[in-house]
Image (cartoon, rainbow, N blue to C red):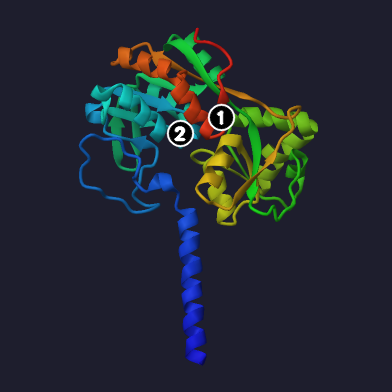
Amino acid sequence: MKMTRQFLTAILLAACVALLQAQTTPPWSKGTNAPAAEPGFAFHVADIDNVPDLHGNPANAQLVLFIGGNQFFVLPQLVAAFERLHPDLKGRIFYETLPPGILRRQIAANGAITLGNLTIQVKPDVYEAGLRAVSEMQKSGLVDGVVQYATNDLEIMIRAGNPKQIRTLNDFGRPDLRLSMPNPEWEGVAHQIEASLQKAGGDALEKAVYEEKVANGTTRLTEIHHRQTPMRIMNGTADAGVTWASEVRFQQSIGNPIEGVAIPAAQNTTAIYAGAVMKDAPHATAAAEWLAFLRSSEAQAIYRQFGFKAALEQAH
């Protein structure tokens, strides 16, 4: 009987470990969203050798998209739908879903980016980010033909069941709360979060979250982008963070123990997503077709499926 209990305990422990690993190994790092026409030998080691933000083969790409990272979960469906309309591009689309600030640095480096010991160089055809960032690129003469295609609202992300009883942004000033927050250095959403913190609690709350708690270690800034926040919440190193509402919906859709706390409209900040064709785009025609597609009913339905809202303005 004693051995039976020990055996059952061991099985339960192994099951718990497997469940935790399943929850903390994100689906985007499993190499399943690689739109390459001729994929090579598949080599992947979770959290060691994987490149979740570069998709496809840049060597033979006929359309290269640089897209802000918070849209990573929308792209597989968007790309597949676009390829159905343009079968000549099937398997010939390469896209990156890094934070907009990092993508701009890559553009400034003539399209080169180094990950570990690997350097690739690819010229983007399209740049997508928040409207402010895209408009700045347009003023700098780097892009043209700005298209607005979706909007999004902020939401507090917490662990399922809300064990810390987080109700509002004002709770973020509590010393017992460990926060995961976007890094203002390269994530535009951080500035919108700062605006919402100002609306909720003024300078004191913004300073508490982004200065005092950063200094004492109870706010951790992201090293990549804010999809690190759900990972930290699930592995127990953070209690909450602010992300876009679409990211809460995505985590729930894949069964992760994540919930959201709505931020009132008076304290919220709405993002407008936009894209534009790079002035030196190697594939300008395909780039224009992609941007037109983003405003189509099919693309808009995909965005709504993931919690985004409709675009506010027409292309200009």
Helix, strand or loop at label 1? It is loop
Closer to the chain start, of discs 1 and 2, is 2
Q: Nearer the viewer, residue 182 or 293?
A: 293
Q: Nearer the viewer, residue 265 or 116?
A: 265
Q: Callout 2 environment at 10 Å: few (<14), some (14 to 19), or many (20+)?
A: some
Residue at position x 51%, y 91% from top?
Answer: 2
User: What mark, if any, has residue 308 been given in the picture?
Assistant: 1
Residue annotated with mark 2: 74
Locate residue 45, reporting x and y percent.
Answer: 33, 54
Residue 81 lies in quadrant:
top left
Residue at position x 45%, y 33% from top?
Answer: 74
Q: Is 215 placed left or right of 229 in the picture?
A: right
- Relative to 118, residue 144 above or below: above
Residue at position x 31%, y 26% from top?
Answer: 83
Q: Is 116 placed left or right of 132 in the picture?
A: left
- Relative to 179, residue 270 above or below: above
Q: Is 87 placed left or right of 154 in the picture?
A: left
Locate residue 3, reporting x and y percent.
Answer: 47, 90
Locate residue 28, reporting x and y percent.
Answer: 41, 44
Observer able to see residue 113: yes
Residue at position x 69%, y 52% from top?
Answer: 162
Helix, strand or loop at label 2? It is loop
Asked whether disc 1 touches disc 2, contact meaning CB atoms under 8 Å apart, the reply is yes
- At label 1, the amino acid type is Phe
Count how many numbered circles sit on residues in the image: 2
- Relative to 238, residue 279 above or below: above
Q: Is 210 placed left or right of 171 in the picture?
A: left
Observer able to see residue 179: no
- At label 2, the amino acid type is Val
In three-dimensional space, the C-alpha distance between marks 1 and 2, rounded to whole angstroms, equals 10 Å
Locate residue 257, reporting x and y percent.
Answer: 58, 53
